[in-house]
Image: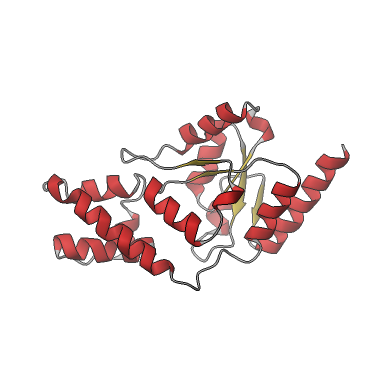
Amino acid sequence: MCCAAYRHAFKQYTDRTYSDAELEALFGPNEEGIIRSVLADRPALVEGCLQSYLTAYARLHGDELRPFPGVERALRMLSEHRVPVALVIGKGARSAAISLERLHLLSYFDIVEVGSPDGAIRPFSIRRVLERWRVAADRVAYVGDAAYDMQAAREAGVLPVSAAWAPKASSENLAAQAPLAVFSDLAQFVAWLGCTLGRASSS
């Protein structure tokens, strides 16, 4: 959806069609930062292009889009065990709000930390969560589907857990980061989470 929305906006503002690979090479900053880099010589167009992106992004969610089966169960389990949950992502605040609202997930998260137009800041964002929770890093796990997520988790001192169930996630690339665990199936993750929460409750 991100690539399709960027393609729509950039076609409108640059009259060029970008491939997924070209767009993914720009990832790191949030949407505003990516659009700024593409329109560096035309800064007055950035906000208009961003609005075009957000309109397309919202439309692409559609009425049938749902979280991966099992995600809501995992979040409910954490909520029932009173485990705080934060969302740390590279998206901008406006696109994150669209996804959380359309997927009906906002209520599960105590904290939402979004990306920066100046570049990737995930380790910093994870540390901000730790400061607000006032909890030791080694008592927190960060679940992500990219090698950078695992690197950011280690840099912030939290436990890296790999979500390899998304179509574009690479189990091999994730495993190469030596995370605590790699889950290629969401049901496996939910089962692991249940066992972990059960052990914590009985200790």
Judged left or right of residue 92, residue 201 is right
The answer to whether residue 92 is seen in the rendering is: no
Q: Is residue 8 above or below residue 149?
A: below
| Residue lying at 15% horizontally and 51% vertically, measured from the top left | 45
Q: How many numbered marks are there? A: 0
The answer to whether residue 39 is seen in the rendering is: yes
Q: Is residue 203 above or below residue 131?
A: below
- Residue projecting furthest to the right: 202
Quarter holding residue 76: bottom right
Query: Residue 135, image x and y in percent?
Result: 65, 28
Q: Is residue 13 above or below residue 93?
A: below
Judged left or right of residue 89, residue 202 is right
Query: Residue 10, image x and y in percent?
Result: 21, 61
Judged left or right of residue 114, residue 16 is left
Image quadrant in which the N terminus is located: bottom left
Quarter holding residue 179: top right
Coloring applied to the structure: secondary structure
Identify which residue, 38 or 12, lies in the foreground: 12
Image quadrant in which the C terminus is located: top right
| Residue lying at 63% horizontally and 30% vertically, measured from the top left | 137
Query: Residue 132, image x and y in percent?
Result: 57, 29
Query: Residue 122, image x and y in percent?
Result: 46, 38
Identify which residue, 136 or 18, lies in the foreground: 136
| Residue lying at 18% horizontally and 64% vertically, measured from the top left | 12
Judged left or right of residue 50, residue 145 is right
